[in-house]
Image: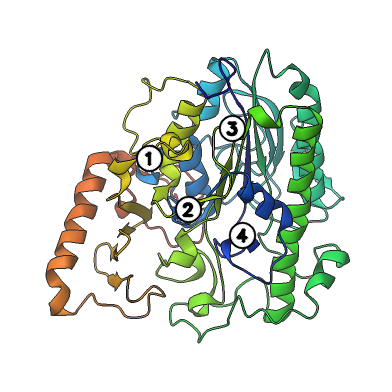
């Protein structure tokens, strides 16, 4: 139970799309305008070392919802929908999400926005309300959406529309939250591309004279993917990227104001995260894990912004550098809601709810983080990062305390051979513990070009990846 007594907290889970951990004012970026996110951080805890489970949207999102890694749930790349058709594959049909467990315990659950980990037209288990994006991206005006099972084009600015839908959910269920708590996923498509000519002028104008020193354009990475879909006008894309975040920030302010108006802010856990990180020129490429080939595990791709606020429970103005992962989210939310998870097996994550409450978690002081993206796997401590690419490499080893920008690859330096072996052994032991051999990512031809079918043995021999 939380400190408010017998009342279980409501949960508003706000998820952005492709937002770098560096892209918030409260994270130290002096150019980007995010007053509402900054205020949210001031009312709770901001996490400086939060990592996605995979540096691309669909597997990262599936891991958030299930608490399991891609080599358990089988979503290894972004899900590529048939053009002009509904994607009917049920990627998570045999998985249990935290929303389903919350619903079993009496929560009303809703989705407003992007899902992109299953058949988007059918409400996932546990959801009473379902307003979803048809795919994983698209224009901000004329976005492909699904309402009441019907596919249509939404002509209004989609960031505003997602918020309006979430506000209607809050208006409907917020007044009765004392009797029945609610959970809502507010999943924005911002700041996912496209960025040019896709955002209201009043937001792009805010960055007309911005120098974008917070986002330096580095020498082109040798693994950079050719012909990125957003064009060559770097400044216009930066304006659009920053503008999309500021526009989203304004809408987050509307959500927070609604919670205050309904008198339920003090019993509502507000979480803000991104699905994966993003480079806007950092390391010489634009994108996330699949911004390069072979896929990368740079911190700009795997670190995400993360803020948690629950007044009276989570102390205000806290910042933690404890290492946390997306696979820790499900057990944390369930503990916060006093929901048992005994029927969910093989979950690698641990609840960090005690950390949020300020009770301390000494067992996490030496925690390491694991990531995967198909045949690319990573283990990271505060001091070291090792990236292994099965079966032939290239591999990477970075001494982060002296090389936080990951410039000097020590993989072939004999002086660090023992450290490399220790890191690799830790990585292989951990994945051996949790991987389901039926959908093991190291056996899948994941290139970052999208997943089109079930993976591993579930594919029954059919092609699963482009």
Residue lying at 76% horizontally and 29% vertically, measured from the top left? 170
Identify the mark nearer the N-term, 2 or 3: 2
Check disc 4 and report its element: helix, strand or loop: helix
Q: Tag count in the figure? A: 4
Examine the rendered structure and indicate whether residue 147 appears above or below residue 160: above
Residue lying at 42% horizontally and 55% vertically, measured from the top left? 321
Check disc 3 and report its element: helix, strand or loop: loop
Mark 4 Cα within 10 Å, few/some/many (few <14, many 20+)?
A: many
The image shows residue 212 at horizontal and vertical percentages of 66, 78
The image shows residue 409 at horizontal and vertical percentages of 29, 78
Mark drawn on residue 26: 4
Residue lying at 44% horizontally and 49% vertically, measured from the top left? 464
Check disc 2 and report its element: helix, strand or loop: loop
Mark drawn on residue 77: 2
Q: Which residue is mark 1?
A: 360
Between the C-alphas of marks 4 and 1, the distance is: 23 Å
Q: Position of 261 compared to 39: left or right?
A: right
Identify the mark nearer the N-term, 4 or 1: 4
Between the C-alphas of marks 2 and 4, the distance is: 31 Å
**2 or 3: mark nearer the eye:** 3
């Amino acid at each position: 139970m939380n400190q408010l007594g017998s009342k279980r907290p409501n949960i508003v889970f706000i998820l952005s799309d492709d937002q770098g951990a560096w892209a918030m004012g409260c994270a130290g970026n002096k150019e980007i305008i995010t007053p509402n996110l900054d205020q949210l951080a001031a009312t709770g805890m901001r996490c400086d070392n939060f990592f996605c489970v995979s540096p691309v949207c669909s597997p990262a999102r599936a891991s958030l919802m299930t608490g399991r890694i891609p080599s358990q749930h089988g979503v290894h790349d972004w899900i590529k929908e048939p053009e002009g058709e509904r994607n009917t594959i049920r990627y998570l049909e045999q998985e249990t999400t935290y929303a389903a467990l919350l619903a079993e315990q009496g929560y009303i659950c809703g989705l407003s926005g992007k899902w992109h980990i299953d058949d988007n037209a059918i409400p996932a288990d546990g959801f009473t309300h379902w307003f979803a994006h048809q795919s994983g991206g698209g224009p901000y005006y004329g976005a492909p959406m699904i309402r009441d099972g019907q596919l249509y084009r939404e002509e209004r600015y989609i960031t505003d529309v997602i918020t309006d839908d979430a506000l209607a959910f809050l208006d409907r269920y917020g007044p009765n939250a004392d009797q029945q708590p609610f959970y809502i996923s507010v999943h924005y498509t911002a700041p996912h591309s496209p960025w040019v000519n896709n955002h209201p002028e009043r937001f792009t104008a805010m960055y007309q004279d911005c120098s974008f020193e917070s986002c330096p354009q580095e020498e082109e990475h040798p693994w950079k993917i050719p012909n990125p879909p957003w064009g060559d006008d770097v400044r216009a894309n930066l304006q659009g990227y920053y503008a999309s975040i500021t526009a989203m920030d304004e809408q987050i302010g509307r959500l927070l104001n609604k919670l205050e108006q309904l008198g339920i802010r003090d019993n509502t856990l507000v979480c803000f995260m991104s699905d994966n990180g993003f480079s806007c020129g950092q390391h010489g490429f634009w994108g996330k894990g699949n911004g390069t080939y072979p896929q990368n595990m740079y911190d700009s791709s795997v670190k995400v912004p993360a803020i948690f606020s629950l007044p009276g429970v989570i102390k205000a103005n806290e910042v933690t550098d404890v290492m946390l992962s997306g696979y820790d989210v499900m057990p944390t939310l369930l503990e916060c809601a006093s929901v048992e998870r005994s029927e969910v097996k093989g979950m690698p994550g641990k609840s960090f709810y005690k950390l949020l409450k300020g009770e301390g978690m000494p067992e996490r002081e030496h925690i390491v983080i694991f990531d995967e993206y198909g045949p690319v796997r990573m283990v990271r401590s505060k001091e070291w990062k090792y990236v292994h690419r099965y079966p032939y490499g290239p591999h990477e080893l970075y001494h982060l305390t002296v090389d936080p920008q990951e410039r000097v690859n020590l993989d072939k330096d004999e002086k660090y051979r023992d450290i490399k072996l220790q890191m690799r052994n830790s990585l292989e032991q951990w994945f051996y513990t949790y991987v389901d051999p039926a959908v093991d990512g190291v056996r899948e031809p994941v290139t970052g070009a999208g997943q089109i079918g079930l993976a591993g043995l579930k594919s029954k021999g059919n092609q699963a990846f482009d």
